[in-house]
Amino acid sequence: MIDTNYQAAEKFFPQDKILAKTALKLFPKSITPNHITVFRFLASPIVGILMLCDSFVVGLVAFLLVAFSDALDGSMARTRNQITNWGKIYDPLADKILIACAIFTIVLRYVDLWTSLIIIILETIIVLVAWRRKERGGKVEANIWGKIKMCLQVLGVTILLISIVFDWAGLLPFASGTLYLAIAFAIVSLLSYGI
């Protein structure tokens, strides 16, 4: 169901206009943002399996494609006025599944246990807080802090995958640092929910 109370024009992000004039033109109107979110749900475990099997080159490409689908579905929803209550809940959940697949398959192996645990614990708490808020009739949608956190997580995992693919150990501290920064933004995002 389309959320008719949402005023899309007020919530555009910088990438929306760029994607609307480029990548979104490849998608017919019959493909909705929710279809792309479902794709991310189905594709994330495949990304995890690729990384688990040490297929890092294909895993990097697959990870970037699936992560890019997050930008696509959000921009599609806003620019085509196709924002749904289902999408508000399940789009962020699909993001968390993608990141969890990366955390359990490569961050745990190449960064450290504590970084992995903190990210997973924070993401779990964010999901629980969002569900509790929804059950109480509150508004549940991603905020700017959560979007920055997701971008940093994707960047951190991407840097980590590049360091693995090209055997550039010197990039590992940058991957770790980016993930630490993502943790800081996850905390800010969580606090912004008013817990």
Image (cartoon, grey):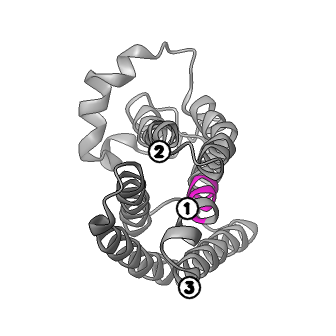
**In this image, 179 relative to 42: left or right?**
left
Q: Earlier in the sequence, mark 2 or mark 3?
A: 2
66 or 158, nearer to the observer: 158
Which dot, 3 or 1, sits closer to the camera? 1
Q: Which residues are magenta?
A: 96-103
In three-dimensional space, the C-alpha distance between marks 3 and 1, rounded to whole angstroms, equals 13 Å
Image quadrant assignment for residue 175: bottom left
48 or 144, nearer to the observer: 48
Taking the spot 40% from the left edge, 15% from the top edge, the residue there is 26
Identity of the amino acid at label 2?
Ala
Identity of the amino acid at label 1?
Ile
Taking the spot 43% from the left edge, 41% from the top edge, the residue there is 64
In three-dimensional space, the C-alpha distance between marks 1 and 2, rounded to whole angstroms, equals 16 Å
Residue 68: where, in percent of width, then height?
A: 42, 40
Q: Which residue is mark 3?
A: 114
93 or 178, nearer to the observer: 178
Q: Main secondary structure of the magenta part?
A: helix
In what quadrant of the picture does the C terminus appear? bottom right
Please say if the residues under marks 2 and 3 sit with CB atoms less than 8 Å apart: no
Q: Is residue 99 magenta?
A: yes
Q: Which residue is mark 2?
A: 67
Identity of the amino acid at label 3?
Trp
Residue 152: where, in percent of width, then height?
A: 36, 63
Q: Residue furthest front?
A: 167
8 or 169, nearer to the observer: 169
